[in-house]
Image (cartoon, helix red, strand yellow):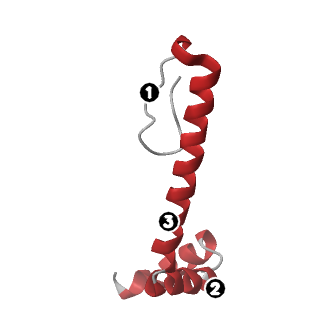
Amino acid sequence: MPRGLKPIFLAARQFADRHTPTIEQEALTSLLEGGLYEWHIRRVRRHNGELRCCLLGVSDQAFGAWVTIKGADGGLQIVV
C-alpha cells in the first residue's frame, strides 16, 4: 500500500480488529504441528459413527418400514 495510506489502514484495522487472539492461535498451531488435531478429528468421527449407528438401529426398531432414512452414510444429520 502507499506509505501515505498506512496510518489510515492501521487505524481501520485497530477499529475492526481489537486484538489478535494470540493464545488461541498458538494453541491451534501446537495442535496442528503435534498431530493432535488429526487425532481429535479421528476420535470424534469414530464416536459420531457409533452414535449414528445407534440412532439408525433405534429408528429401525421403532419405525421399521414406516420411514425411509436418507443420508445415513456419514456426518451427524439424517433425513427421515
Frontmost of labels 1 and 2 is 1
Labelled disc at residue 23: 2
Q: Residues within 10 Å of mark 2 (few under 14, many from 20)?
A: few
Labelled disc at residue 41: 3
Name the residue type under label 3: Ile
Q: Residues within 10 Å of mark 3 (few under 14, many from 20)?
A: few
Q: How many marks?
A: 3
Expressed as whole percent of the image width and height from the top left, the position of residue 35 reads 45, 81
| Quarter of the rendering containing residue 16 | bottom right
Expressed as whole percent of the image width and height from the top left, the position of residue 55 reads 60, 36
The residue nearer to you, when weighing 67 against 10, is: 67
- Residue visible at 51% across and 13% down in the picture: 65
- Residue visible at 60% across and 40% down in the picture: 54
Q: Quadrant of the N terminus?
A: bottom left
- What separation in Å lies between label 1 and label 3 (alpha carbons)? 24 Å
Name the residue type under label 1: Lys
Frontmost of labels 3 and 2 is 3
Name the residue type under label 2: Ile
Residue that numbered label 1 is attached to: 70
- What separation in Å lies between label 3 and label 2 (alpha carbons)? 21 Å
The vertical placement of 23 against 65, above or below, is: below
The residue nearer to you, when weighing 56 against 80, is: 56
